Image (tube, rainbow, N blue to C red):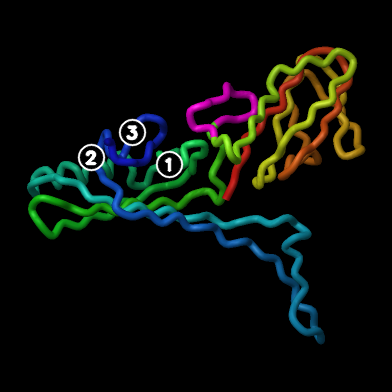
Amino acid sequence: MTPLGIMFDDEKHTYDDFGLRITAINIGFPSAKTSKIDIPGADGYLDMTDYFGTRYDTRKLTIMCDVEDKNYYNWAGRMSQISNYLHGKRRKIVLDWDNGFYYLGRGSCEYDKDNRVYSEITLKFECDPYKYDLTATDEDWLWDPFDFDEGVIREYGNQTVDGALVLTVVGSPMPVVPKIIVSADMQVEFGGELYRLKAGENYLPDIEIKEGEHVLTFTGHGTVTVSYRGGSL
């Protein structure tokens, strides 16, 4: 059985391409960016964090591996091979055991060898706070990594608008402003407000998709695509 590993940029795998066997992994969670105002003469402070919406710092991934390189010559070559690919590079990171999502982070490599046969390698990544859905709402859905217990299918591409279309979209824990692509000028109602859409790509900051269901009502004639990528901590 092939050991579990990590895929980078859909092209390199820790075990298949580098021979690395994961011995331990730490997936850190990002700290919340808080906004606090000190009120003179009052106890404590005024916490404005929720007013602006919770935002996060980066998160850290640490992956400890070993590799059977058998001698110091192979070890030197393996160090260069891995470092040339990962060290200082920003990569898409997919964990074999959580392959419905990916992380984006910049890597660094540390090496240690205390015997002739094996060496230890630590890969560290500073990543965006959220892990991203592997597929966006306008991309072909992938069944292999789909989680049938908790996964949500979001397919909002090339929807036909013939007078009116009521489209219910499902958000994720990561708030996102979607890209709305329409084939002709039309209008969309969201949250009780009406917005005009021009043919082509539209970004409307007031239309923010958060966790839960959201209703977009389009009026006009043509096709519409609501494109965004969800995310989770």
Q: Nearer the viewer, residue 95 or 176?
A: 95
- Which amino acid, mark 2? Gly
Q: Residue furthest front?
A: 149
Q: Which mark is residue 97?
A: 1
Q: Looking at the image, is 28 positioned above or below residue 131? A: below
- First-in-chain label (3 vs 1): 3
Gap in angstroms between the C-alphas marked 3 and 2: 11 Å
Residue denoted by label 3: 12
Magenta part, dominant SS? loop
Q: Can I make out residue 201 in this image?
A: no
Q: In the rendered structure, does residue 139 fall within the stretch colored magenta?
A: yes
Q: Position of residue 7 (x, y in %)?
A: 38, 36
Residues at circles 2 and 1 in contact by the CB criterion of under 8 Å: no
Q: Which mark is residue 19?
A: 2
Q: Secondary structure at mark 1?
A: helix
- First-in-chain label (2 vs 1): 2
Q: Which residues are magenta?
A: 135-146
Q: In the rendered structure, does residue 188 fall within the stretch colored magenta?
A: no
Seen at 42% across and 53% down, the residue is 61
Q: Position of residue 6 (x, y in %)?
A: 37, 40
